[in-house]
Image (tube, grey):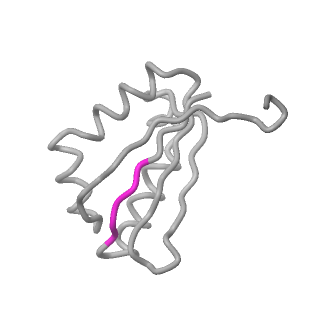
Amino acid sequence: MITLFGQHGVANVEAWKRTAKENINNPDRNAQWGIVESSIYFMVDGSGVIVAHKFNNLEAAQKYKKMMESAESKAMLEKIGGKLPFTFSLAEELLLADL
């Protein structure tokens, strides 16, 4: 399982939440991109969010990351109350039992 972590600032939390609710909870969109699970973490100081999307394979995660790095996605982020820069990390979970 591969997790893509995306982090960015948020200028308008309520606007961002409305759009996130429509998109991150959309099963058709998630199936299209190969997203099997998502989580959202708000910074305790209110400065931004981390969105974690889990994928079954690295290829699907890389494809989604590439789309999110596009100029169109960055413009959409700003339109919905997010703030650039938008940073990404791909990670594979290491279970404690596997150490």
Seen as rendered, the residue at the extreme right is 97
- As for residue 2 lying within the magenta part, the answer is no
Rendered residue at 54%/37% (across/down): 3
Q: Answer above or below: position of 73 versus 29.
A: below
Rendered residue at 52%/47% (across/down): 52
Asked if residue 10 lies left or right of residue 93, the reply is left
Q: Answer above or below: position of 83 versus 22.
A: below
Range covered by the magenta-colored residues: 6-10
Number of labels in the image equals 0
* Prevailing secondary structure class for the magenta stretch in the rendered image: strand
Seen as rendered, the residue at the extreme front is 99
Asked if residue 77 lies left or right of residue 25, the reply is left
Quadrant containing the N terminus is top right
In the rendered image, residue 2, in percent from the top left (x then y), is placed at 56, 30
In the rendered image, residue 44, in percent from the top left (x then y), is placed at 52, 77
Residue 71 figure quarter: top left
In the rendered image, residue 16, in percent from the top left (x then y), is placed at 37, 66
Residue 18 figure quarter: bottom left
Quadrant containing the C terminus is top right
Rendered residue at 39%/55% (across/down): 7
**Closest to the observer, 9 or 19:** 9
Seen as rendered, the residue at the extreme bottom is 45
Asked if residue 9 lies left or right of residue 22, the reply is left
**Closest to the observer, 99 or 8:** 99
Rendered residue at 29%/75% (across/down): 11
